[in-house]
Amino acid sequence: MVIDELKAALGEKVTLNATIREHHSKDESFHTPTLPDAVVFATCTQDVATTLKICNAHQTPVVAWGAGTSLEGNSNPIRGGVSLDLSQMDKILRVSGEDLDCTIQPGVRRKQLNEYLSQYGLFFPVDPGADATLGGMASTGASGTTTVKYGAMKQLVMSLTVVTANGEVITTSRRARKTSAGYDLTHLFVGSEGTLGVITELTLRVFGIPEVIAAATMQFASVREAVDGVIEVIQLGIDVARIELVDRDAVVAVNRYSKTELPEKDLLLLEFHGSAESIAIDIAQAREVLGRYGGAGFLQTTDEAERRKLWQARHDAGLACRSHQPGGRIFSTDVCVPISKLSQCIEETQRDLADSKIYGPIVGHVGDGNFHVLLTAAPNDHAALERLEEFHTRLVKRSLSLEGTCTGEHGIGIGKIDYLVSELGREAVGVMALIKKSLDPNGIMNPGKIIDDSFYL
Amino acid sequence: MVIDELKAALGEKVTLNATIREHHSKDESFHTPTLPDAVVFATCTQDVATTLKICNAHQTPVVAWGAGTSLEGNSNPIRGGVSLDLSQMDKILRVSGEDLDCTIQPGVRRKQLNEYLSQYGLFFPVDPGADATLGGMASTGASGTTTVKYGAMKQLVMSLTVVTANGEVITTSRRARKTSAGYDLTHLFVGSEGTLGVITELTLRVFGIPEVIAAATMQFASVREAVDGVIEVIQLGIDVARIELVDRDAVVAVNRYSKTELPEKDLLLLEFHGSAESIAIDIAQAREVLGRYGGAGFLQTTDEAERRKLWQARHDAGLACRSHQPGGRIFSTDVCVPISKLSQCIEETQRDLADSKIYGPIVGHVGDGNFHVLLTAAPNDHAALERLEEFHTRLVKRSLSLEGTCTGEHGIGIGKIDYLVSELGREAVGVMALIKKSLDPNGIMNPGKIIDDSFYL
């Protein structure tokens, strides 16, 4: 009956096709796939409003869908209902070089956006790795390798158009660079994982493509030395655009997978954006600081092809570390701690991995205190999965004990619902639940994510 | 009866003293003073929780109070009740040079914080002019002259401890540099002007004091040329720490008031933070760009006393422009537009001032698109006040038509409630009202601010 109404209103944008439903049943994580009852391909804000109005009247779940690249089951339709596919809403609506901003539809992908912006000499910096949609990136509060210089989605989304559960369309802010006008609805929707509304338009800050981009790498004898060097680089305000750790295990995996011959040590990869003069100063300062922490084998380049080669270890790490488990799915971890606690957190985690005989190379956005243990789950090996989950629980507990968070950038999704309560307490999650209930009284928006149902009852 | 309960619970922290109540009846704006029924001086989070529990049970309004420096009646107790004074909660609880953050109580003032941080070689950049409390600055979503480089309160508050209307204490986030853990409660409370809860602890980002600080000024023949130059400086990513406009009228007022002999032209004041080398590059670039827009009379210095002198026009502008109206109160305006529209907005505003024979010199945080018309209201001249209000309405309408906001940094308070609806629409304000109602069902938290009562009914 819901589907009949949707078809009457939206025609062929509604499909029950099994292959398409299957495609919308899971993201890139290990979480169990679940089929939606139907998929709606929205092409405009009005389609989204129509879908939500009908589904709200029938109390049918609606789960927004972008590129399916999330890592916490964020877009899995775990209670069926409608998967609302926004990938056809992929228009770039406006770019302003004067104001350094743009307005786009939610289905625009990261690479598409940057290709388009390049003709204006502009770029959008948030780089989570995957070629995600910007709507999805806003919904999960994504960040990535450039956050240390440019900020995460939280810092770079200026305004959103959102359809709320009852089909109302709101715009959260004007296009001014700053505002104190009322509650910050923009930030309420960024990172809410589609549980409060569906984003149908985004206004984003963009940046001028730097005159020069320089890449550099250095090797270290231990994670502690590498990270302590990073702390001082950050503390001195040296202007790094990216500063990434690839640990020794990950370097070994890359050498095997990519046939490279990198020294098998803990590796820092850096990138600098600016003018030739300013970059020269920044690189010299960073090299001097990191040298004092034992950093060796310094290499640098501004040539684009060579930059890509220098950063290959970082780009290949994910695939390389997972290549031992063909067909395996990503079991992601993304704790983030105050940077002063990062060495301790990584060292204890490496000991835990060794003690529990789990293979887990580490890469990290160390300038932000954020790192990933690259775990892989064989789809049907329940015993192995359970061991990974136990390890993850210990990792999160460790992060929380060091004043960190259970998720620096992937969101809560399905798997971290209990961790959120450990992290912020029942009272704070209770406040989130009050907000959720006030905006989505029928609980149709991506149910079963972020907040446990028990908080509503 | 409420007061009896409060006294029983909090003893001498509760006062009915007439002078103290009078002191808590108004902020620095022209808005009509109203006495609170009592003032409670909280010394800890528990005092705040106790006050809110008792007041919530009796449906008695509670208005948080910091330094009383707000400019939109934000802290005026317009419906009586309790003025909850947090100025005695002025402890700096923790500073981390490694993590570049600190945790403080809400009554800590800006200058006090920076004096304390200086011993660690650190500073907190948000500078709204007044020596406000940090709790108040978070509540109004303050910003100021350094926002162009360092961001506003929105960007620099990492976490808050908040007491909600029912007396529950929550912490909104961990101390990690970034997080995607659940709804962004931090940003919900920043800028909510005490209408959702009372902030009792803040964790803030801080920065290393720059090696060198350089100040510079240049004169322009018109606001358009000055602002067009600023646009290009921002667009090129030249690293300015402050870039402020003082228009010709304000320069004239300063010359008269401060006995200076500045050229009576539109003035840009700049500040640069960094190393000697990086600053030299930035200044040369900025000077070259601004020179192409007719900028002349370039002066620069890195000496602290000389810097203060070079920036005197900016510091004295407020008092100078208001000196013609002794005893007058501040009628503040703070529209903020996309920077590409800033020249047009200021030019049209200057024409409007001339046409309506209103004296209104302009100063602006032009790197952000934000400017103030320095109006002064004689307390009992109702006809004059009405003319200012009509002018303000036209100014806001102009800003909104240029995709701007009615408030860049002072908040909605009492005076801009209708403008908020014009700015974001009834649906968006309706969403704010749903959130307000869910967190403060009895409407005790700073009632009559931000959202009109009619939205609850």
Image (tube, coloured by chain):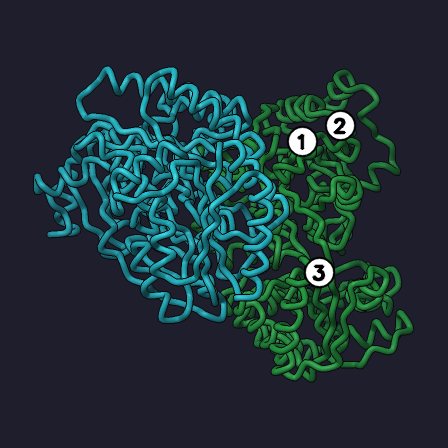
Chain colours: A cyan, B green
Q: Amino acid at mark 2?
A: Ala
Q: Which residue is mark 2?
A: B42
Q: Which residue is mark 3?
A: B332
Q: Secondary structure at mark 2?
A: loop
Against B157, residue A11 (above or below) is below
Task: Locate residue A294, reporting x and y percent.
Answer: 55, 39
Task: Locate residue B65, reporting x and y percent.
Answer: 73, 38
Marks 3/2: CA distance?
A: 30 Å
Q: Which residue is mark 1?
A: B200
Label 1 marks a residue whose chain is B
Is label 1 in contact with label 3 (beta carbons under 8 Å)? Answer: no
Marks 1/3: CA distance?
A: 28 Å
Tell me, yes or no, whether dots 1 and 3 are on the same chain.
yes
- Dot 2: few (<14), some (14–19), or many (≥20) neighbours within 10 Å? many
Is label 1 in contact with label 2 (beta carbons under 8 Å)? Answer: yes
Tell me, yes or no, whether dots 3 and 2 are on the same chain.
yes
In depth, the one of B318 and B17 nearer the eye is: B318
Q: Earlier in the sequence, mark 3 or mark 2?
A: 2
Q: Earlier in the sequence, mark 1 or mark 2?
A: 2
**Of circles 1 and 2, which is in front?**
1
| Quadrant in which the N terminus of chain B is drawn | top right
Q: Amino acid at mark 3?
A: Ser
